[in-house]
Image: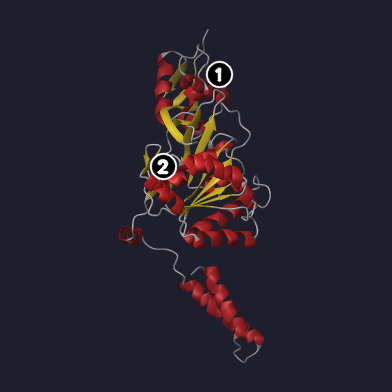
Amino acid sequence: MTENSVKKSDEVAYNNVSLGIEPECEKAIFETEYKKKKEKLNVTCSLAEMFNRVKNEPKIPMLYPAIKEGSVGLIYGVAKTGKTIFCENLGMSIAAGRKEFLGKEINSSSKKVLFISMEEAYQGRTERNMKQFESFNDEEKESVLANYIVANENVPKIITSNEDWNIVENAIVENEAKIVFMDSLTRMVDGQIENADIARFTMLKIRELADKLKITLIMIHHSTKMNEDQPMTLQNVAGSRVISQEADFIIGINKTSSNVRYSKLVAARYANDNNSTVEKFELDENLWVNVNGNAEEHQILNPTFDKRRSDHSLGLILDKLKELNGENELIDAKLLTESLVINKMISEPTLYANLKKGTALGRIINPEKGKYGLAVIN
């Protein structure tokens, strides 16, 4: 029981039971008893105790790479990249009982999936779902029909009031759904999503719902206005940075100017996200996602990159060195890591490999360990 719930229950008792003494005395007694209960609330334990507790509890599985059961996260990107189709395909695959999606393992303890769409009319969405449905065999189709639940036109188009949230909660409980997709996060924000306090309130509300019902909650979200050939990073997730901070995973879906679609693990709390490799995919006639290879993101975004730079990663490093400290200063490798690796422009191994390459080519100087600068080229 939380501190607030303890105090609330005590207040109810206080308001409904009279001790037959002066109100001031009753109030003092209530405050004293509440203080005692508060003091008894144990909020810590030793690391050894926590080790033993976790060892004796069932291990929480990874439902899908980077998506742990019970987690809350985002599938984001600009409009018309395939975000919703990606989520529908994943949700239907879980409902069908498939063991993999896009060549990666599905490990879900439940097949019950609820897809709540607040942005799209049911007719168009259902016509698309009917095409996707044809990607399954007969046995899988029966499972999808039984386990994949969708919202109808009565679902609120904006979920901000307590009444709206109660409708969503009841729908999840009544359908016994354990994996919930919601389209989209912006329809769940009461105010400007760029406002940190508003974003924090919304994400905590979403987290409370997921924790209370023990569900995995995947929200479709939008990116900021970005060039279609721009790398996907935490910086182009729409809204306050609190959105990204509170999410357990963030998967980006993009479509380049040359019509190449790809997915990218932008950030993850429970998986290794230090990788600049992305998965290219195509949509077939049934609007089903099919992987057609992996590649470095910059190779997809810049297929005709300036040939004077034989390596795009080296070019990024040279540009960043110039941007950060001009042509006459040395900068720490840590600063390059923060600027390029954390922002998902290149991986850490690629960074150091190209620093070494640039030094060998005479483009970069490395006069002391961990310090780099631009070489002066006459």
Which residue position is annotated with label 1? 327
**Rendering colour mode:** secondary structure
Of discs 2 and 1, which sits in the foreground? 2
Q: Nearer the viewer, residue 298 or 361?
A: 298
Local SS, label 1: loop
Q: From this view, report whether residue 336 is shown above or below residue 90.
A: above
Q: Amino acid at mark 2?
A: Phe
Q: Using the rendered view, name the quadrant where residue 18 is placed.
A: bottom right
Which residue position is annotated with label 2? 136
* Residue projecting furthest to the bottom: 20
Q: From this view, report whether residue 296 is shown above or below residue 34.
A: above
Q: Residue at x 66, y 86 (%)?
A: 23
Q: Nearer the viewer, residue 303 or 131?
A: 131
* Residue projecting furthest to the top: 378
Q: Using the rendered view, name the quadrant where residue 351 is placed.
A: top left
Q: Nearer the viewer, residue 106 or 297?
A: 106
Q: List x then y, in percent, for residue 332.
A: 48, 29
Q: List x then y, in percent, for residue 71.
A: 46, 51
Q: List x then y, in percent, for residue 369.
A: 41, 26
